[in-house]
Amino acid sequence: MNRKGQVTLFILLAVIIVSIVLIFFLWARPTYLLDTGKGLGFENCIRDAMEPMIDELGENAGFVNAGFSYLYGGQEFVYLCYTNEYYKTCTVQVPFLRMNFQEQMEKVMKEKISVCYDNSIENLKAEGYSVTSGTVDYEILIEPGVVRVEIDAPTSVGSQKFARFNVQVNSPIYEMVMISTSILQSEAKYGDSDISEMMRFYPDYIIDKIKRSDGTTIYILESKLFGTKFQFASRSLAWPAGHELK
C-alpha cells in the first residue's frame, strides 16, 4: 500500500509539473517573455529611431515645431516662460513639461513605430513564417535615466502569440526636464535663476545662461555624459532700454 501511495504521489507531481510547463509556454510566455520582444525583433529599429529624436526634441524644448520662440545664433529657442511687460515676472507657458515632451515624442514616433513593426512582420513572412499582425498601440514614458516605449501589438507567429513589448533607451532627458522645470519656477517667481547653485547639485550637467538686451534669457542645458541638450528661452522681469541695474 505504501509503494502504491508513493507511485500515485509521483504521478500526481509529474502531472502538476507538466501542467505548469504547458501553462508557461502556452499562456504565460506571450505576456512575460515578450518584454524582451523575442520573436519579432523590431526593438532595435525603434531604439535607433528614438535616440536621435530625443536629442532633436531636447534642442527644441520638447516641441516638434518651435512656435513662439526667440532667434539667437541661427537657432530658435522656444519661450517656456514669458511676459511682454516690463517689471513683471513671466508666466510659465508649458506647466507640465515632462508630459508635453512625452506627447510630442509620441507624435513623431507614431510613423516610425508602425514602419518598424510592419517591416518585422514582412521579414518574418519572407522567412516562411505564418504571421497574423494586429493593431499597434503604444505609450512613451520619460523616467529617471531612461525613455521607455510600451507597445501593445497582438501578433501571432506560427503557434506563438505575442502581446506586449517594452523598448527603452538610456537618456538623461528626464533629469534635464526636471532641472528646466526648477529654472522656470525660479524665473516665474523671482525673474531670474541661480544656475551656479544648480550645477553644484547637478554636477553631470552644464547650464549656460545668456542674457539678451530685450530681457530674454536663453538657457542651454547639456549632459556631460550623453551630450544631449535641452534649451529654451525666458523673458521675465525685463527692464526698459536705457535702464541700468545697480
Image (cartoon, helix red, strand yellow):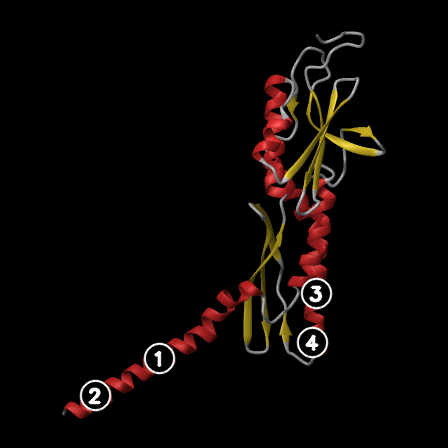
The image quarter in which residue 244 lies = top right
* SS at circle 2: helix
Residue tagged by mark 4?
A: 125
Residue tagged by mark 2?
A: 6
Q: CA distance from mark 1 to mark 4?
A: 35 Å
Of badges 2 and 3, nearer the viewer stands: 2
- In the rendered image, the residue lying farthest to the right is 74
The image quarter in which residue 97 lies = top right
Res. 118 mark = 3
Of badges 4 and 2, nearer the viewer stands: 2
Q: Which callout, 2 or 3, points at the residue further toward the start of the chain?
A: 2
Q: Amino acid at mark 1?
A: Ile
Regarding residue 99, the answer to whether it shows in the image is: no
Q: Which callout, 1 or 4, points at the residue further toward the start of the chain?
A: 1
Percent coordinates x, y for residue 62 in the rendering: 69, 39
* SS at circle 4: helix
The image quarter in which residue 44 lies = bottom right
Percent coordinates x, y for residue 96 in the rendering: 59, 34
Q: Which callout, 4 or 3, points at the residue further toward the start of the chain?
A: 3
The answer to whether the residue labelled 1 contacts the one labelled 2, judged by CB atoms less than 8 Å apart, is: no
Q: Which callout, 1 or 2, points at the residue further toward the start of the chain?
A: 2
**In the rendered view of the protein, which quadrant contains the C terminus?**
top right
